[in-house]
Image (cartoon, rainbow, N blue to C red):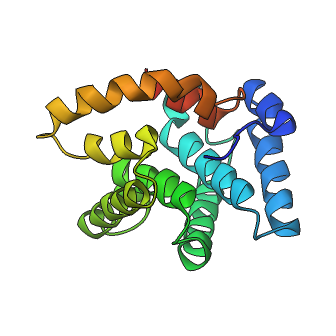
Amino acid sequence: MIDWTWTEVDKLEKQEKWNEAKAYLLNSWRQNPADLKTVIRLGFFCWYVVVEQGPLGIADADVDMDELETLLEEVTHFGLTHFMTNEDFLWCFGYMISMFPYYFGDYEQWEEKGISMLKRASELRPDEPIYTYSYLRSFSNTYDKHKEVFQQVQIVLEDRFKGEGLLSDYFKNAFN
């Protein structure tokens, strides 16, 4: 799994400088579109801010949500075109898509796509409990298997999500 630490971005996100963080990530992506960490961090940033706008206390006047949604679509399309064999991409985007498929298009179609991406990530890396747990969580009838994998996740959680950015904080909280 990628080391999610990115000091400059983590700092901007912690300070809730949403526009500056978006600009930094977008500029990084434009300079190096093939960098997987940048694609995932940018996609996650857009997704998280759009999804959590209310709890984050972000007003529409503060951040252009339409721009973030458009950017999320663009980054998702780019990733689907270039990284569909990479387990980190499949896991993170599969997670985001399966959690809130309506931000990506037709609900049922995208929900199914997100779950299939999670499944593929766990198949590519069956030794990675984060991928397995994310996939199993997408089904309500796998609670017993959840518990077993959840314990494995707890052992690796801090190591897998180093850094203090939105992505690391989100998953440390979601999986804890």
Q: Nearer the viewer, residue 136 or 46?
A: 136
Residue 25 in sight: yes
Q: How many marks?
A: 0
* Residue 68: percent from left, percent from top: 63, 55
Q: Nearer the viewer, residue 39 or 70?
A: 39
Is 153 left or right of 89, judged from the image as shown?
Answer: left
For residue 175, above or below residue 133: above
* Residue 108: percent from left, percent from top: 24, 65
Q: Which residue is at a point 31% across and 58% down the rendered structure image?
A: 115
Name the quarter where the C terminus is drawn.
Answer: top left
Q: Which residue is at a point 49% across and 56% down the rendered structure image?
A: 93
Q: Which residue is at a point 11% across and 40% down the rendered structure image?
A: 141
Which of the 4 quarters of the picture holds residue 57?
A: top right
Is 154 left or right of 19, judged from the image as shown?
Answer: left
Residue 57 in sight: no
For residue 148, above or below residue 32: above
Q: Which residue is at a point 77% across and 32% down the rendered structure image?
A: 10
Which of the 4 quarters of the picture holds residue 36?
A: bottom right
Which residue extends farthest bottom? 81
Which residue extends farthest front? 127
Is 143 left or right of 129, judged from the image as shown?
Answer: left
* Residue 65: percent from left, percent from top: 60, 51
Q: Nearer the viewer, residue 52 or 132?
A: 132
* Residue 47: percent from left, percent from top: 54, 49
